[in-house]
Image: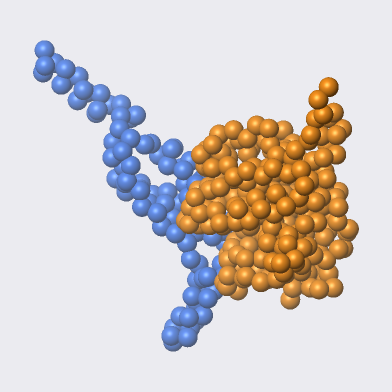
Chain colours: A blue, B orange
Amino acid sequence: MFFVFQGFWLVVEAFSPDFPILMKAVVTVMPKPAILDPAGVAAGRAMEHLGLKGVLSVRIGKSIEIEVDGANEAQLHEIAHDLLSNPVVEDYKLTILS
Amino acid sequence: MPKVTTVIRCAVIQFPGSNCDTDCQAALNSFPGVQAEIVWHKETSLAGYDLIVLPGGFSYGDYLRCGSIARFSPIMGAVRLAASTGVLVLGICNGFQILCEAGLLPGTLMRNRGLLFRCEHQHLSVEYTGTPFTSGLNKGQVLDIPIAHGEGSYFADKATLRELNANNQVLLRYADADGVTSDEANPNGSLENIAGICSHGRNVFGLMPHPERVCDALLGGTDGRAIFQSILDSISKTSAARV
């Protein structure tokens, strides 16, 4: 009887897409192209000051690494949109690593 | 029949990291007939309050973005509900940032143009007086109210900005002592010198300057009182009309 049960769960794990699985993801948040990024401009000036020639653009964003057990991609998109980025001035990119 | 004394009840929301909450409470309680209370952000009801204040500070350490985490505090459901029923909501500095993050006001507040935290006296020009927050002021009046922020540069897309202007939702702009809204008088790079805006329904007001800090001559000024007086007079009038 015990073995029958174990076999049942293995089947569920393999075929149900909603079954909790560990997920690693990275959310990259960047200021939208049209938005002035004063911190990026200041960092760019410092690069020139250090001798780097031809600095055309520097944009500073955020990278957020997430490990989560039992979430799906749609939920992560929701979190990235509502919490991790401000859609008024920022774009995000969600990358699922594993 | 017993005499009914009208008390104006104000809630000052305290988030972890708020630091202007007791200043707001003290400023409000310095007016007669006002009862201002601190309400912890984990509360879920704001029933019975005439005014809700989201004070300045650094809620959640300004982690992620200013106001982005406070926006999801349990109390925000009640703030949203109150705002939708016409209760007056005032967001000062970090409170303004929270209201923008929550979508109760359009646009957002970005890093100051010069990257510096600006903590100084600032002149403001009163742009529109047809709201409960500015009804006691005069159009073009110059107020001296301090600012203290690193992320106060107001931004909204072109369509939103057009709408704000068309609907007279810009209530205060950064100006010089003569009320001229020049670029030199703009401390943080805000679009069109915007210092404070209200919602389409005119019952939610957010501003970066701190009126609660200039409500007592001992503290260097009283120009903030005009804003609170407007709010309290508007509330009194509304409740009188209701009775």
Give the quadrant of residue A28: bottom left
Is there any visible trace of residue B157 in the rendered image? no
The answer to whether residue B144 is left or right of residue B75 is right
Let me know if residue B114 appears in the view.
yes
Q: Quadrant of residue B111?
A: bottom right
Where residue B1 appears, as percent x and y from the top left, is 83, 22
Place of residue B159 in the rendered image (x, y in percent of width and height, measured from the top left)? 73, 52
* Residue under the point 88% across and 58% down: B138
Depth check: give the residue in front, B173 or B2: B2
Q: Residue at x 76, y 50 (%)?
A: B31
Q: Nearer the viewer, residue A97 or B90?
A: B90
Residue B121, above or below B108: below
Q: Is residue A12 above or below residue B58?
A: above
In front of the other: A43 or B218:
B218
- The quadrant in which the C terminus of chain B is found is top right
**What residue is drawn where x is 72% and y is 52%?**
B30
| Residue depicted at 56% across the width and 39% down the height | B75
Residue B183 as seen in the image, left or right of residue B103: right
